[in-house]
Amino acid sequence: MNVQSTRLIESDAPCLSAAIDNLRGIVVLMVIAVHAVLAYAAYATVGPFDSPPYQWRTFPIVDAQRFIGFDIFCAWANVFLMPLFFLVSGFFVWKSLERNGALRFALRRAARLGPPFVLGVAVIMPVAIYPAYAMRTGHPELSDYLRQLWNLPFWPDGPMWFLYMLLVFDLIAAGLYAAFPGAHGRLRRIAFQAARRPVRFLAVFFAFCALAYIPLGTVFGPMRWFQWGPFSFQENFVALYAVCFGAGIVLGASSLENGLFYPRFAYRWKYWMPAAMLLFAVWLLVSAETFTTATASVGWMLADAIALVPACFASCLCVLLLMVRYGHVRTGLLQSLQSNSFGMYWVHYALLTWLQFALLDFPLPAIMKAIVVFAAGTVLSWTIAVALRYVPVLSGFLGVGQRRGVRPVTSLRAPMPLPD
């Protein structure tokens, strides 16, 4: 690499840092948007609270006002959003492992992700689920709700499942880092090749995604969840999450200033956007058979799994490249968003279910209700996240509140706080 190229990369590094910082805030807003519109999806079904199939886990509130466009939006988010979450979460793992070592890294991750998961399932989720119980019960009483909640064969974890699964992946990464010190150099060489030949890396990444998803997607189908106590995950996606997390580690080890994150490569979003739209439309047509048919054939399940992988891959890459190309603006608002994104993710679900419950009897169209819920839920979760960072017992994993006049320093090599 010549001196001019090196200087260009160094000058682009701050822009890339801002783009990755902003990305974690944007994906949290997308999660809030998905949960805000679920109550108004045409596919939403009610079902009882205390007996299978416990449809309130997906649709806690079901409004009489519906809009089919929300089904398409939620389907698109289901295809790629959580894989992108795990991909982004892996970016800074390698740098953090090199800086802290395996044991310290594992302890810090456990302290960062363990308490919010425990408090989330023990405190926030019971508050979030009460509106689902109240909507399905003629005369809701707190004592009866607690009794029914306690008698469930599982403990609802809602969006908190992401926290414990990310912790599991972090601990596995720390264990492998400690167990195979001789492989560190090999990973650096792989990361260097990924930076030099991003197209080849993407081809290998896509192949691993296909191997990870297609068998499980064929066997389990698109909607089956594993549930044991407070631990749950979508069975068809779990291996794909691991692959995306591992790919994030490789990209982070290759230095985010190079390869796939080099601004010139980001111009290729122009090709990936129409590809993502087309591939998603193909998957949507194929998946209609598996979603609407209770006993879809193995052939349709296989077709659904095969169609999902390129749709997921293209959408992830398109969003990533768009952020690298255009998401490098630094403003106080965006800085606040990325700093409080973890806290917003942690509290938003309870706020949204109560807002949806409060709007049930209002004579508004579905789109207006969804806008109100999303806007109010975003502002409230943002405000609460800012306030909670000043609570000493919570600031350890939410981040310490910034005093006025003090600007937080962010770096590409700093651990990612969503959720770090």
Image (tube, rainbow, N blue to C red):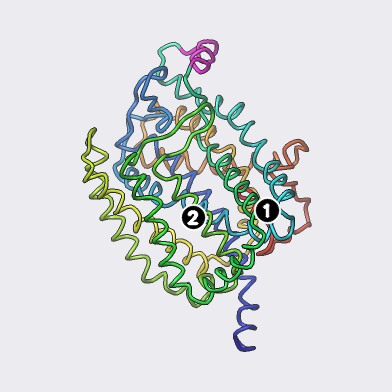
Q: Categorize mark 1 by other alpha carbons within 10 Å: few (<14), some (14-19), many (20+).
A: some
Question: Residue 291 placed where, x, y %?
Answer: 27, 39
Give the spatial CA distance, label 2 vs label 1: 21 Å
Question: Residue 335 placed where, x, y %?
Answer: 64, 57
Q: Amino acid at mark 1?
A: Ala
Question: Residue 206 placed where, x, y %?
Answer: 40, 61
Give the residue pinned by disc 1: 178
Label 2 element class: helix
Residue at point 63%, 83% (across, down): 6
Q: Amino acid at mark 2?
A: Cys
Question: Residue 63 placed where, x, y %?
Answer: 36, 30
The first of marks 2 and 1 along the sequence is 1
Give the residue pinned by disc 2: 244
Residue at point 67%, 46% (across, down): 109
Magenta residues?
A: 140-151
* Left or right of 223, for residue 231: right
